[in-house]
Image: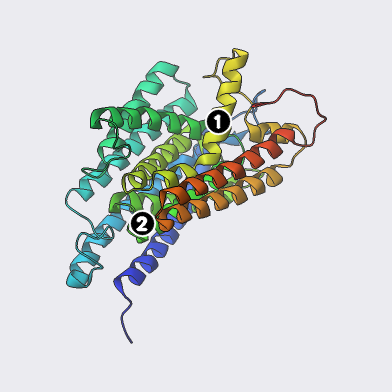
Amino acid sequence: MTAPSPGVAAVLAGLGLVGATALGAALLVRLLHPLLVRYALARPNARSAHRTPTPQGGGIAVLGALVPAAAAGAAALAAWGAAWGPAMPEPGSTLALGPGDALRLATVLAAALLVGAVGTVDDIHPLPPLPRLALQLIAMGLAVSALPEGARVLPWLPLAAERLLLVVGGAWFVNLTNFMDGMDWLTVADAVPATAALALFWFAGLLSAPAGLVALCLLGAMLGFAPFNRPVARLFLGDVGSLAVGLLTAYALFDLAGHGGLVAAVLLVLYPIADSGLTLLWRLRRGDRVWEAHRHHFYQVATARGCGVREVLGRVFVTNIALAAFAAASLWQGRAALSVLDLALGAAAVALLLRALARGRAPRGESRPGA
């Protein structure tokens, strides 16, 4: 029997890593659930979407499965590269660990653990906004420092300005992910299509090995967590999970943008960016304290106006799948004009989604975000 090619072997090994990470996350949820019920119970309040006390902190299981899985994946890549030798697809392939890649992976995982620790404390005893933001910026700075040497996301800017913008923008995305984690399965519906697409882009040579491993393991960990968070959820991610998911996703997106996929990176997360961004502008216009919890996101308005949770999730998931398809098209068409067209099509799909969510099934004439 002929041995599979390196590319096919990498895909098969990647699927195995996704499955192993998912299984690890599910087992950790089972083990941690009694402790989370006892020490991390989220009780309903005026801004909650749930009606009964529900444990949070599922992100501990997500990180607990992801970190060792990524380390094991890195070790497997090193062994795989040594075994294949000259049969590797090409010298310096992104499917092999390059010089410094192990340190970069360790750095971004340490950043995820740091922001996860901040989230854990915040889940149990809310932190003041400024110290929380400062720690998030430090964690994002670590993640940005783990990008490949010479990678440029915005090459028209000076390198120092670009890196500063990535740190600030990444911290914003971390909080955005936290803000969007307000409905059962919503973070799953956002993260699974994005990380699956990122993993496929890695196999196509468009991500570095550390970012590819992060995307694969995050996909697996979220799939393992998903059964416990499906409506009606038995477990929430908590800040420990949403903040870490945001940081790891931002890192992989920055890596993709550094490989020439800026439009694709934007498309993969265009829905959460649009929902949270327009809601933020609407709340600023109203004079709200934007750092406080609220129920004005488009997906929250939809449920308040009569849409079912599964209906909202279905619309969001289908839109995210479409965005992933537009992102893939922008990468393989190879022409700037076509990439702009893909971005416009993605923006139109998101606009239709937000319009449908804002309308819901309630009577007309009520105030709504973005209206």
124 over 74 or under it: above or below? above
Residue at image position (62%, 30%) is 297
* Residue 56: x %, y % from top left: 53, 36
Mark sitting on residue 202: 2
On the image, which quarter does residue 205 sit in?
bottom left
Q: Position of residue 206 (x, y in %)?
A: 34, 54
Quarter of the figure with the C terminus: top right
- Horizontal relation, residue 233 to residue 79: left or right: right
Instruction: Kindly give the residue lying farthest to the front in the view shown.
Output: 337
Q: What element does badge 2 sit on?
A: helix
CB atoms at circles 1 and 2 under 8 Å apart?
A: no
Residue type at mark 2: give it. Answer: Trp
Identify the mark at residue 276; answer none if there is no mark.
Answer: 1
Q: Is residue 196 above or below residue 240?
A: below
Crowding at mark 2 (Cα within 10 Å: few <14, some 14-19, many 20+): many
Real-space CA distance between mark 1 and mark 2, rounded to the nearest whole angstrom: 28 Å
Q: In front here: 273 or 135? A: 273
**Type of amino acid under label 1:** Ser
